[in-house]
Amino acid sequence: MPALLLLVVLLAPLLAGCVPGGARSGGVPSADAPFTLTALDVGQGDATLLRTAQVAVLVDAGDPDADIVRLLRHEGVDRLDLLIVTHAHLDHVGGAPAVLAAMPVSVV
């Protein structure tokens, strides 16, 4: 819950202009959908990508075998503004070292 609260606080200024129906699942943010939420298929575990035109946030990174970097690159992500790890179970944190080694991450 604290991670979700932090996410809301950090993204609130960027999402303030959003209107109902202004989000899209997957893809790149646009004028119609100022932010996107993409559930990345990491098998067992979680990895959720939230993006605006300016910000990319990853919440959890799947397990070490999830190939999370390939999934992020497939979504057009080459840097993260924020990586949130909700808890220390391997199926949530396991892919984080690969992300940190492969691309710039501003805040963890």
Image (cartoon, grey):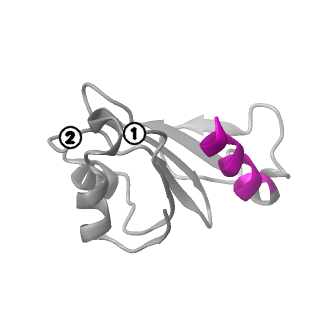
82 w.r.t. 34: above or below = below
Image x and y of residue 101, in percent = 25, 69
Image x and y of residue 73, in percent = 30, 58
Residue at point 41%, 69% (across, down): 79
Tell me: 24 left or right of 103. right
Tell me: 18 left or right of 57. right
Q: Which residues are magenta?
A: 1-12
Say which element carries label 1. loop
**Pointer 1 or 2: first along the chain:** 1
Contact flag, marks 1 and 2 (Cβ < 8 Å): yes
In this view, the residue in front, 57 or 77, is: 57
Residue at point 84%, 52% (across, down): 16
Tell me: 52 left or right of 8. left
- Give the Cα distance between marks 1 and 2: 9 Å
* Label 1 sits on residue: 47
Residue at point 71%, 43% (across, down): 5
Image x and y of residue 102, in percent = 25, 69
- From this viewpoint, is residue 34 visible? no
For the residue carrying disc 1, how many other residues have a C-alpha within 10 Å: few (<14), some (14-19), or many (20+)?
A: many
Image x and y of residue 24, in percent = 60, 37
The residue type indicated by label 1 comes to: Ala
Residue at point 62%, 62% (across, down): 53
- Magenta stretch, main secondary structure, is helix
In magenta segment, residue 71: no
Quadrant (top left/top right/bottom left/bottom right) for the N terminus:
top right
- From this viewpoint, is residue 85 visible? yes
Say which element carries label 2. loop
* Label 2 sits on residue: 66
> What is the total number of numbered labels drawn onto the structure image?
2
